[in-house]
Amino acid sequence: MDKIKKWFKNKWIRRVSFVIIGALLGFAYYYFIGCAGNSCPITSNPYASIGYGSIIGLVLSGGSKRTKDMG
């Protein structure tokens, strides 16, 4: 378990992992929930779903910076 924590401390490995997981979840959303017609611009196209999923993964990967208390 310590190896996994040490591996995820590297910010680039963590970001790439989150982007890949986001892309996979975006494709899963397209495959299982997406609409068949062209009425849904994101979920009717697998490339758009993968793109949005990877962007969400990138945004979620970068929010763990700690700051000192000013007190």
Image (cartoon, rainbow, N blue to C red):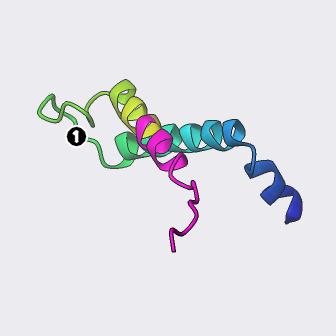
Q: Is 66 placed above or below 34 here?
A: below
Q: Which residue is mark 1?
A: 35
Residue shown at 74%/50% (left/top)?
Answer: 9
Q: Residue at x 48, y 49 (%)?
A: 60
Q: Is residue 6 above or below residue 68?
A: above
Give how far across and how far down residue 14 sits, in percent. Answer: 66, 44
In the rendered image, residue 32 lying in the magenta stretch gets the answer no
Quarter of the image holding residue 64? bottom right
Q: Position of residue 62 (x, y in %)?
A: 53, 46
Q: Residue furthest right?
A: 3
Q: Which one is nearer the viewer's eye here, 4 or 39?
A: 4
**Residue numbers of the magenta segment:** 55-71
Report the amino acid beneath label 1. Answer: Cys
Quadrant in which the N terminus appears = bottom right
Question: Around disc 1, counting alpha carbons within 10 Å, would you say few (fewer than 14), some (14 to 19), or many (20 or more)?
Answer: some
Q: Which x, y percent locates residue 21? A: 56, 44
Q: Quadrant of residue 37?
A: top left
Q: How many marks?
A: 1
**Residue for point 37% across, 48% down:** 32
